[in-house]
Image: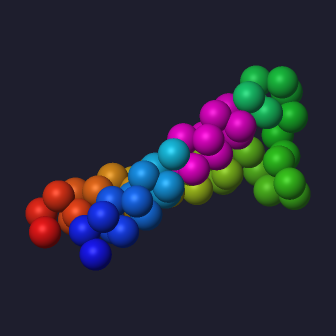
Amino acid sequence: MKSQLALVGSVLGWSGVLVCLVSALVKLTGSYYLFGAESQSVFIGGIGLTVAGILAKIEASNR
């Protein structure tokens, strides 16, 4: 269970970083929308994914 939780944390964390990077690049090109949503909202979603990944990794390390 510990290794599965750590894996989920890694996947969530890296996907959050990727979403943040894509959103930032779209914003820097001058476009304010990404897949029909504001790029700022997508960026905040990426932050949420990263935080969820961090929390999962912390929980895995405490078990």
Is residue 16 covered in magenta?
A: yes
Q: In the rendered picture of this protein, how many numbered marks are placed on residues?
A: 0
Front-lying residue, 51 or 11 = 11
- Say left or right for 45 vs 26: left
> In x, y percent, where is residue 3?
30, 64
- Say left or right for 50 vs 28: left
Q: Residue furthest left?
A: 62
> In x, y percent, where is residue 25?
74, 28
Residue at position x 43%, y 63% in the image: 8
Indicate the quadrant containing the C terminus: top left, top right, bottom left or bottom right. Answer: bottom left
Q: Residue furthest bottom?
A: 1
- Say left or right for 22 vs 52: right
Indicate the quadrant containing the N terminus: top left, top right, bottom left or bottom right. Answer: bottom left
Magenta region, residue range = 15-24
Confirm whether residue 47 shows in the render: no
Q: How is the image coloured?
A: rainbow
- Say left or right for 4 vs 38: left
Q: Dividing the picture into quarters, in which one does residue 45 lie?
A: bottom right
Is residue 20 covered in magenta?
A: yes
> In x, y percent, where is residue 12?
49, 57
SS majority, magenta: helix
Q: Is residue 9 above or below residue 16?
A: below
Residue at position x 40%, y 59% in the image: 7
Confirm whether residue 6 shows in the render: yes
Front-lying residue, 49 or 12 = 12
Residue at position x 64%, y 34% in the image: 21
Q: Dividing the picture into quarters, in which one does residue 18 lie?
A: top right
> In x, y percent, where is residue 58?
22, 57
